Image: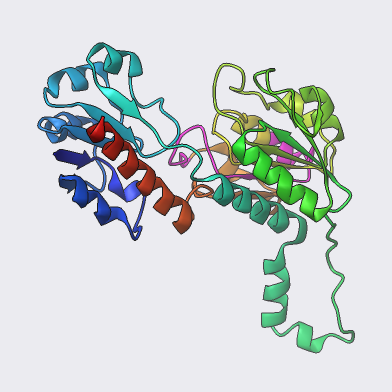
Amino acid sequence: MNIVFLDASTVGDVPNLNSLKELGDVTFYDVTSAEETAERISKAEVVITNKVVMTRELMQNAENLKLICIAATGMNNVDREAAADLGIEVKNVAGYASVSVAQTTFAMILHLLQDIQSYDAYVKSKEYSKSPIFTNMDQNYHEISGMRLGIIGLGNIGKKVADIAEAFGAEVVYYSTSGKNTDQPYTLLELDDLLTTSDIVSIHAPLNENTENLIGAEQLRLMKSSALLINTGRGGIVNEADLARELDKESIAGAALDVFENEPIKADNPLLGIDKKDRLVLTPHIAWASVEARTELIEGVKKNIEEFVNN
């Protein structure tokens, strides 16, 4: 079987990547541009893609193509209607990153709440060695216990975040972006109520017609001035220009984003030019990417190919 992985660099150096070779003749490309895609898939029976776009035209011209495996959960980079018309199966992998994203979410929350790095720098600078007292009270931090954590999108990842929040002693509330997820063991609120009353707002929703630009200036101004906004869901849910302005206005205490409207983030993104830089944490879409999660992802891709062959 001829298998082509178009953007293998997006899963990094995972220990089981070469196990895909057990399934056939595999060609790994680190990255593939739109101009290179047609040639690279021309003889492939199976194409693995994380973010490389698969259009109708590309699929029509790949005469041997039988299966597209998406090395991710999101499937919006593949024209699934065209694939169905052409008899090409499309499979994704779900559930592999829930623990990783939840852990990163709390790494961001703890960074914004407590900023261990600044204490570490204080000690290593030898300023602590000069202190007349045993501690340092130059900055305050607060406990998660007793806070209200509002989750936007209570799917598998949102539930993991809720579990951890409760372990910290926080109260969990949530908002259903679809309006259908109403049977959960947490208080369901309308969005405005969640924003107004939460100390931490954490986004774990897909990007769709219900969530695009869900959080803009109007919504940010509803939040407490002491509140934090975390987005490890999808770029485009938070209006980045509005967030940059409201952070500089100190409408909220801080924000952390792992996802952006354009990825990689554009150099002129307003978030990169804010004055209140200490109020903002930005990471390059890595919340999903623990070694364990990426290993499970490759196992999922391999399983999808095996099931397709067996059926």
Residue drawn 10% across the image and 32% down it: 43
Identify which residue is drawn at 45% across, 34% down.
73
Q: Range of the magenta residues?
A: 245-267
Q: Quadrant of the C terminus?
A: top left
Q: Residue at x 75, y 82 (%)?
A: 127
Where, by quadrant of the figure, is residue 222 drawn? top right
Front one among 201 and 170: 170
Q: Is residue 174 above or below residue 85?
A: below
Q: Position of residue 162 (x, y in %)?
A: 72, 43
Foreground of the two, 59 or 89: 89
- In percent of width and height, residue 45 lies at 16, 32
Q: Is residue 195 magenta?
A: no
Q: Quadrant of residue 199?
A: top right
Residue 255 showing in the rendered view: no
Name the residue furthest front.
Answer: 310
Res 184 visible: yes
Residue 258 part of the magenta segment: yes
Most common secondary structure along the magenta stretch: loop
Q: Quadrant of residue 67?
A: top left
Q: Report the side of 186 relative to 241 (left or right).
A: right
| Rendered image coloring scheme | rainbow
Asked if 261 appears above or below 264 in the picture, the reply is above
* Residue 205 picture location, percent across and down: 60, 30
Q: Is residue 200 rendered to the left or right of residue 48?
A: right
Where residue 167 appears, as percent x and y from the top left, is: 78, 53
For residue 82, above or below residue 236: above
Q: Nearer the viewer, residue 136 or 178?
A: 178
Residue at 20 percent of width and 26 percent of height: 66
Q: 39 or 164: nearer the eye?
A: 164
Question: Total label count?
Answer: 0
